[in-house]
Image (cartoon, rainbow, N blue to C red):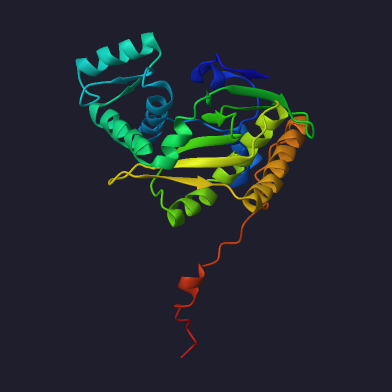
């Protein structure tokens, strides 16, 4: 099922396993997924604002006062709560705008963002045919003419080498396969998945990264393993860390190599 009229907040409040859940299992464990505590940070808010500026014209964000202190901020919070918009300080709002601008300064990223018939932030809900789990995703951009799917990703380093490290550190590759799989189960053909990497440290710059066939295949193996772990944990109501019962603490190699053992002299 594909829906184009669900707000970002309503989507995140809906049932179903998301790519974030899968990444938590891969990076930590099913225990950490089951007990996850979602925290908001300024960096996350800036990233959300970048998405909103580029994909929805900035209609869901508010440029607030300079600081979060005083009555001016409290008044702005009241307005944001009433309108269900994201409130940022002036500095973070301007930062998000500057980052978002670089996505249009890069011709390849700009073309992806401005695809004539692009489907923006459609929410997709399907049942996994392997595990029976309900799955969901919300791709930033789907280009039905070229069958391309694109995701905006704010990152500390959008360079070829830097983003590759970030991709596997945070398992963006798993997200790419998960989104592709869910979209295809819902009837969308996806020939290529691209990340529009927007640097969030000055000087701001953006660059497109395309997932290779080999990268997607490797990600597939991990995603399916994570989904099976989640399904089994839910079925048995057993959520484990995967850790041993206890851990023997030994000095790290760099310390052990420098130990001056007493030889009894």
- Quadrant containing the N terminus is top right
Residue nearest the viewer, comparing 3 with 17: 3
Q: Is residue 185 left or right of residue 255?
A: right
Residue 131, x across and y down, in percent: 78, 33
Residue at x 64%, y 21% (from the top left corner): 15
Direction top: furthest residue: 82
Residue at x 50%, y 41% (from the top left corner): 195
Residue 39, x across and y down, in percent: 45, 31
Residue 216, x across and y down, in percent: 64, 47
Callout count: 0
State whether residue 35 is above or below residue 65. below
State whether residue 165 is above or below residue 252. above
Q: Is residue 146 left or right of residue 155?
A: right
Residue nearest the viewer, comparing 187 with 10: 187
Residue nearest the viewer, comparing 106 with 157: 106
Direction bottom: furthest residue: 265
State whether residue 171 is above or below residue 179. below
Residue 75, x across and y down, in percent: 25, 12
Residue at x 57%, y 35% (from the top left corner): 149
Q: Is residue 254 left or right of residue 187?
A: left
């Amino acid at each position: 099922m594909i829906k184009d009229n669900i707000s970002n907040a309503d989507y995140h409040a809906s049932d179903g396993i998301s790519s974030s859940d899968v990444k938590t299992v891969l990076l930590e464990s099913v225990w950490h997924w089951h007990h996850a505590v979602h925290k908001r940070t300024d960096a996350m808010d800036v990233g959300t604002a970048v998405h909103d500026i580029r994909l929805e014209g900035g209609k869901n964000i508010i440029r607030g006062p300079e600081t979060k202190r005083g009555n001016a901020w409290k008044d702005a919070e009241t307005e944001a709560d009433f309108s269900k918009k994201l409130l940022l300080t002036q500095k973070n709002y301007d930062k998000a705008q500057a980052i978002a601008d670089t996505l249009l300064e890069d011709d390849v990223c700009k073309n992806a963002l401005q695809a004539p018939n692009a489907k923006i932030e459609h929410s997709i809900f399907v049942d996994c045919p392997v595990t029976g789990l309900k799955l969901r995703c919300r791709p930033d951009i789907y280009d039905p003419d070229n069958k391309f799917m694109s995701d905006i990703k704010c990152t500390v380093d959008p360079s070829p080498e830097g983003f590759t490290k970030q991709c596997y550190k945070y398992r963006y590759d798993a997200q790419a396969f998960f989104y592709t799989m869910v979209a295809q189960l819902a009837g969308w053909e996806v020939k290529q998945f691209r990340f529009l990497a927007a640097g969030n440290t000055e000087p701001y710059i953006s660059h497109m990264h395309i997932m290779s066939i080999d990268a997607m295949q490797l990600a597939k193996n991990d995603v399916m393993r994570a989904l099976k772990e989640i399904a089994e944990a839910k079925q048995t109501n057993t959520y484990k860390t995967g850790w041993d019962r206890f851990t023997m603490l030994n000095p790290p190699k760099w310390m052990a190599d420098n130990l001056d053992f007493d030889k009894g002299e």
